[in-house]
Amino acid sequence: MNQDYFKNIDKIKFEGKDSDNPLAYKYYDASKIVMGKTLKDHFKFAMAYWHSMNDNGADPFGRLTNLYPWNKETDFMQQAKNRADAAFEFLQKMGFDYFCFHDIDLIQEGASLLETEKRVGQIAEYIKGKQKETGMKVLWGTANCFSNPVYMNGAITNPDFRVASRAAAQIKIAFDTSMELGAENYVFWGGREGYLSLLNTDMKRELDHLATFFNKMVEYGQKQGFNGNFFIEPKPAEPTKHQYDFDAATVVGFLNQNGLQDHFKLNIEVNHATLASHTFEHELQVSANAGMLGSIDANRGDNQNGWDTDQFSINLYETIEAMLVFLKSGGLQGGGINFDAKVRRNSTDLEDLFIAHIQGADTFARGLISAEYILTKTPYAKMLKERYESYDSGQGNSFENAKLSIEDLYKIGINQSEISHTSGKQELYESILANSF
Ligand code: XLS
Ligand code: NI
Ligand code: NI
């Protein structure tokens, strides 16, 4: 049964920067070409089911403020269908082609995993039908192995094998469902994979279990003919005190150490980067350096708050810096831009969902257009290249190519008498950035 949940909202159009219509794109012109590719293809914008369809405004201090009309139905199957109807109507009106989901975003979890498996299978059939009608795609699927109390001591890294095997079974179901819906990627965010106290934790053993499981998932994916990517989404803390997938560098090290580097890439979330005391662009660059820049969970944190506030992207400076890394590293490998962000608890109008996503898309469009401008119309690229030119030829080049021994370096270095200062020109770089939009 198709209901018109967003009756008063038409398909969102691009109206340009002078438009004062809050329900129009000001910068995101899907067909605009930037660096030889349309904005739509660069980004592959996706809606996060959990925030935009399931969230109800509850927080640790208060009950729900915003029970969406599609979630009011009490029959779980009808409710799930209503939610899917709303999701597809929203995507079509936004002009987005993708969504991301956890297994139990689609439908209420059953009393047993067997029951959940049955439910997820049924709603997946319904969603598949809607995909056929509309052409909507899944950017990635994942399993929620953190909400159910059974996971209080961890999922795959649980000290009790009974729980670990339950998590593995749940992940298999979520992965199979994702494949069924044509997911282009599959994400692991280890919500409870970490520890609350090292006193009661055998960290080495838990991490070994995680690596063994990932290797088995690689084998299973190959057997099933999955040709998408596996992504790991780093986060330093929350809900555990110390998450094992702390940041991009930690995850790259873990993948390399366990022979997983050719099978996994990273899904970088802005707010997770800042929680790890990094910047968004730093985490993208670390991933790109490893050839593992897979996907982005777009949101922003709050300078005052030390938790994952998951606000929609509006920080233009941050996004331009990120889009510079994005363009310089050739974009994302297989992934897209998933708005892992939620409207505030007191934003209770249905149009707020649209305004939030429009602003997010506009921020990324603006960021990418500015980054292209910086790379093609300013001295930026030349300045950066010249900063390293002493390695382009001569002895510097020999060093770069590992042709100088420590004795050679000694001979060269000992004679460098008067080394003049070379300015880092940070303010000039910053002014180029600040004048790029
Ligand atoms: C939580 C994570 C989560 C993942 C998907 O902080 O961002 O939403 O993206 O499990
Ligand atoms: Ni996320
Ligand atoms: Ni997050």
Image (cartoon, rainbow, N blue to C red):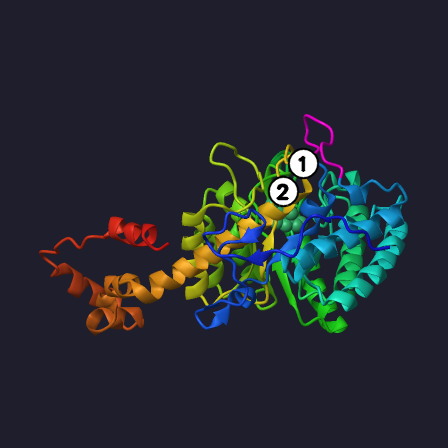
Q: Measured along the vertical axis of the image, is residue 144 above or below residue 258?
A: above
In this view of the protein, which residue sits in the foreground, 227 or 260? 227
Q: Position of residue 231 (x, y in %)?
A: 62, 59
Q: Are marks 2 and 1 in contact (CB under 8 Å)?
A: yes
Q: Which residue was labeled with disc 1?
A: 348
The quadrant in which the C terminus is found is bottom left
Q: Which of the 4 image quadrants contains residue 391? A: bottom left
Is residue 108 shown left or right of residue 22?
A: right
3D distance between C-alphas at marks 2 and 1: 7 Å
Is residue 75 shown left or right of residue 412?
A: right
Crowd around label 1: few <14 · some 14–19 · many ≥20 (10 Å): some
In this view of the protein, which residue sits in the foreground, 59 or 167? 59
The residue stretch that appears in magenta: 57-67
Q: Which mark is residue 352?
A: 2
Is residue 116 shown left or right of residue 437?
A: right
Mark 2: amino acid:
Asp
Q: Residue at x 49, y 46 (%)?
A: 314
Instruction: Examine the rendering and report whether any part of residue 178 can be seen.
Output: yes
Q: Residue at x 81, y 55 (%)?
A: 169
The quadrant in which the N terminus is found is bottom right
